[in-house]
Image (cartoon, grey):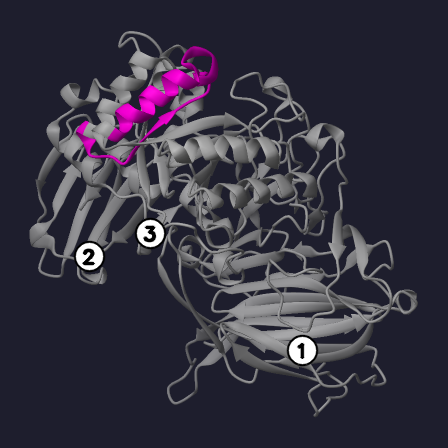
Amino acid sequence: MNTSSQKHSTPSLIGRVRGGSLILLFLFIISPSVSAQQTTRVFSPDGLTYLDVKLADGHLSYSAGYRTVVKAKKKGMKADTLDVPMLLDSPLGVYTNVADFSKDLVFIQDSQSDEPIRQTYHLRQGKQSDITTENNDYNLMLSTPAAKKSGVQMAVHFRVFNNNIAYCYSFIQTGETSAIVVTGEASGFRLPTDATAFICPQSDPMIGWKRTKPSYEENYIWDKPITTRSQYGHGWTFPCLFKVPGKGGARSGSQATTDSWLLISETGVSSGYCGSHLSDATPDGLFTIAFPMEGENNGFGSTGAQLGIADSRISPNSAQAGITPWRTITFGPSLKPIVETTITWDVVEPLYEPSIDYKGSRNTWSWILWQDASINYDDQVRFIDLAADLGWEGCLIDGGWYENIGREGMERLFAYCKQKGVRPWVWYNSNGGWNDAPQCARQCMHNSIVRKQEMRWLQKHGVAGIKVDFFAGDKQETMRLYEALLSDANDYGIQVICHGCTLPRGWERMYPNYCGSEAVLASENLYFSQGFCDMEARHACLHPFVRNAVGSMEYGGTVLQRRLHRDPDKGNTRRTSDVFELATAIAFQCSGQNFALTPRNLTEQPQFEIDFMKQVPTTWDETRFIEGYPGKYIVLARRNADRWYVCAMNAEAAPKTVTIDLSMLSGFAPDKALLLTDGSNGSTPTAAQLKTDKRGRITLTLQPQCAAVVY
């Protein structure tokens, strides 16, 4: 390490770029006399994000933040830079069955990239399609006296991007031991104690409807102290958003003039590891990595992770043995880096090639408003017709088809879909033995033999995708099921949506036929709870900053009926405006989105609302955050090909006035754009030709729970 007391001038590792990955050649191992404290600082390519890695008394830790330019106090003086700490001294390390790699650590060797490492890749779905990144790497190899006998060494890999840091661990075999068990991690995130949180609690295992939790479907806390105790006492699910106050709050020796924001998550979770979450914070602001609970997956499977160690010398990726998932940290002086980050996908690699050219899909979906009784042949024909009338790609046939329609009836529906130019999607229960959810089709996706038989049948009849429900938590055993299901589906050209499930962790890039996950309190709760309807606008203005910032979110939104029921005079009452609902089709990102439109909408809604829904895409080439505050309001722009879609949504109890500079959107043509609003009273949906001022700006006043759309 580059140290405060000594430096090693000869690098022990040499980094080379090959095919977008950093290849690390271990030339030799050195064992310097280790000082009491060694610290290395690594900067991002733009020099504004910093990472400090410290080895002191056998313990490894890190801290991170960003640098801001401070104007010179007097004329002629140079501007200064101020370090704004976002993560304070935070522990690193892994607990394994061969050694405790969190203490008594001995430095072996390290390396830094000599120049930024550049990567360009294409993402079929997400907030951006063609992505170019630059980062600086720092890699550190360590051992412990206890691990010497087993011949296992631990490496820690850091990648420092502009506004983003990611790190993971890998294990290297130098003796006979080639497999280890990870029982936990010391990895932590220590925030300034005046920070506040927008986070979702991890539930107890095997609770909720038919013992189907945890499924990342709890209520967030909003802007609360980070030391708030989680509802169940198990900590918080990823991703976790935090606000660090600006001037006036304690900032550990530094101050920023504005609030700063930080998002913590993980990515690269495959069959080789378990999913994790954050513990409750200690009084001094430390969150640590928490592993799955014993009761998840009906108590089956370990709470840790089995790692087969490859005697490998390459930079870590999610397909390699001996690699842990990446912990990701995104931060800056505004919410723009949070909403626009691509770090989730930047540090992972595809695990297999797509078998076909998968496309985005807008699907009709009877169940969301017509519920179980609609899963019959005649109603599904009506929703296939609706998809055809809208020009949409698909129709989802939900749970209950196995009993109410049967395979012969489904084959007739598949044939009808082909006739109408609509591709069917089919719901499945994932269950093999991990919960009591009764919906069929069951026992069709839980193991490879029956799964492949089922997928051959689906492929034969032109099914585009499946929606698989009721998973069982975050154990490695469950992650193996996700990976096997996705891999098998790709063999048959089938896309996959997950429901009642965990957070996707880089899966859009890792699994090319992956489409989206629920992992949030989604639109079905509008049907079941008036209280959720009352909170809909607030949730909609939260998710782009948190849940949807790190992964595709299959929410199933855009409800245009005023009452949420098949009967127009029954059901919960929607509080949001029509245009607000249209705006969610832009704000929520998922390449396979199941919308809540029903046949009534074609005649009851103004034609311009239907015209918008006919055009709105589900895949995006670019995303631009304009302004907003989590749970209060958001102004967001997304581009598909050469067309921009802009939404401005207000969840507050008072009107909100926003000025949007549309000239910042490259290629935007105001003379060809429409403006959709709810009128000055908030209840008169209106479409008009867009008019901007001379500087390309528009000023809008949004009524409570109302929105505007520009496209």
Residue numbers of the magenta segment: 389-418
Q: Is residue 116 visible?
A: yes
Q: Is residue 669 above or below residue 46?
A: above
Q: Amino acid at mark 1?
A: Thr
Which one is in front, 387 or 206?
387
Q: Is residue 244 above or below residue 238?
A: below
- Residue 343: percent from left, percent from top: 49, 59
Q: Nearer the viewer, mark 2 or mark 3?
A: 2
Q: What residue sits right under mark 3 in the picture? A: 627
Give the side of residue 139 with respect to residue 160, left or right.
right
Marked residue nearer the N-terminal end (2 or 1): 1
Q: Gap in Å between the C-alphas at discs 2 and 1?
A: 44 Å
Under circle 1, the secondary element is strand
Q: Nearer the viewer, mark 3 or mark 1?
A: 1
- Residue 650: percent from left, percent from top: 31, 37
Q: What residue sits right under mark 1 in the picture? A: 40
Q: Residue at x 42, y 81 (%)?
A: 72
Give the side of residue 481 with respect to residue 149, left or right.
left
Q: Main secondary structure of the magenta part?
A: helix
Q: What residue sits right under mark 2 in the picture? A: 642
Q: Amino acid at mark 3?
A: Glu
- Residue 411: percent from left, percent from top: 36, 22
